[in-house]
Image (spheres, rainbow, N blue to C red):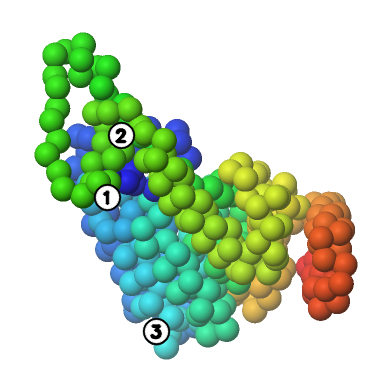
Amino acid sequence: MIPQLWAIAPSSRYHIEQRLRHIATVADRLALASRQAASGPPQGATAIVPIIGTIGRWPSWWTDTSTAEIGAAFDSAIRSSSVQRVVLLISSPGGTVDGVPEVANKIYQARGVKPIEAVADSQAGSAAYWIASAADSVTVVPSGAVGSIGVYARHEDWSKANARVGVEPTYISAGPFKIEGNPDSPLSNDARAAIQADVNTIYGMFTNDVAKFRGVRQSTVKTGYGQGRMLLGPQAVAAGLADRVGTLDSVLAAGASGNRNRFAASSQDDLELRRLRWENEKRKAKTAAEDEMDDEEFKIRMRNRMRQALSK
């Protein structure tokens, strides 16, 4: 009995648990919005795929959007001959991990077909960042944050509460591990180890995908920005979680002008972001050089990344 694995801020999961009376039409509304956004736009248009609220695998009472809906809207935008590029508009703390690596890799594999940009307005946390990182670029609004790379599961032990009210649940099962992790007994060491192994496996998938999508080593993610914290806009850019601070309007305007690398910002802000990128690239290069001094190809790749950071 393995608990559900989550890639979401714990405070947001608590909020979900308070929504038992909200048997929702939200998922239906977002599904409709996704279909409308990705179908029938004018020639050369930008298709906006909304990823708003808590993410689950399928539409349900507690999810605001699902990976099934995200994937369908994205596929529609990629197939449409009238769509020039795709923007993932994200405001989500994350959700369950089910379906997230699949839709993230779907997005990653579509790179080169059309420009794909992610905009965190105002957050792309955990599973939502997993998806955002698959885009060609990640923009975060000035007041926004991205990150929270991590996975967790939770076990609740109700045995003492049951004893206080005189309830004694009895499980009748077959299979030695069928009822391990049940909430009516303390968590055994074996069950804890099994759950931890699952958490570690998904965390490895998460950090491996982010490393692949962002063009860094997995060890860089695990020892750097992949330890569970959210980072605000400029700090996220400096760390390599995002490419720029901007807004949805600036992303759309840059695409309309045919230049996706120019965004509305003051010269002082632009210089500061370049400095932060340069300092971050130097730190990453130093760490990589210490880890693998003999890897000449990796050194060349890091030098190229520093040059690209300065050119943005």
Q: Position of residue 193 (x, y in %)?
A: 44, 43
Horizontal and vertical percent position of residue 112: 57, 83
Crowd around label 3: few <14 · some 14–19 · many ≥20 (10 Å): some
Q: Secondary structure at mark 1?
A: helix
SS for callout 2 = helix
* Amino acid identity at mark 3: Ser
Seen from this angle, which residue lies furthest front? 176
- Number of callouts: 3
CB of mark 3 within 8 Å of CB of mark 1?
no
Q: Which mark is residue 26?
A: 1
Kindly state the secondary structure of the residue where label 3 is placed. loop
Kind of residue sitting beneath label 2: Glu
The CA span between labels 1 and 2 is 16 Å
- Answer with left or right where residue 203 lies relative to residue 254: left
In the picture of the structure, the residue carrying the numbered disc 2 is: 17
Q: Is residue 52 among the parts visible in the rendering?
A: no
Q: In the image, residue 100 lies at what x, y percent?
A: 42, 61
Residue 56 place in picture, x, y as percent: 33, 54
Residue receiving disc 3: 80
Cβ atoms under marks 1 and 2 closer than 8 Å? no
The answer to whether marks 3 and 2 mark residues whose Cβ atoms lie closer than 8 Å is no
Q: Which mark is residue 237?
A: none
Residue 65 against residue 32 in the figure, above or below? above
Q: Quadrant of the C terminus?
A: bottom right
Q: Nearer the viewer, mark 3 or mark 2?
A: 2
* Cα gap from disc 3 to disc 2, whole angstroms: 38 Å
The answer to whether residue 283 of the structure is visible from this angle is yes
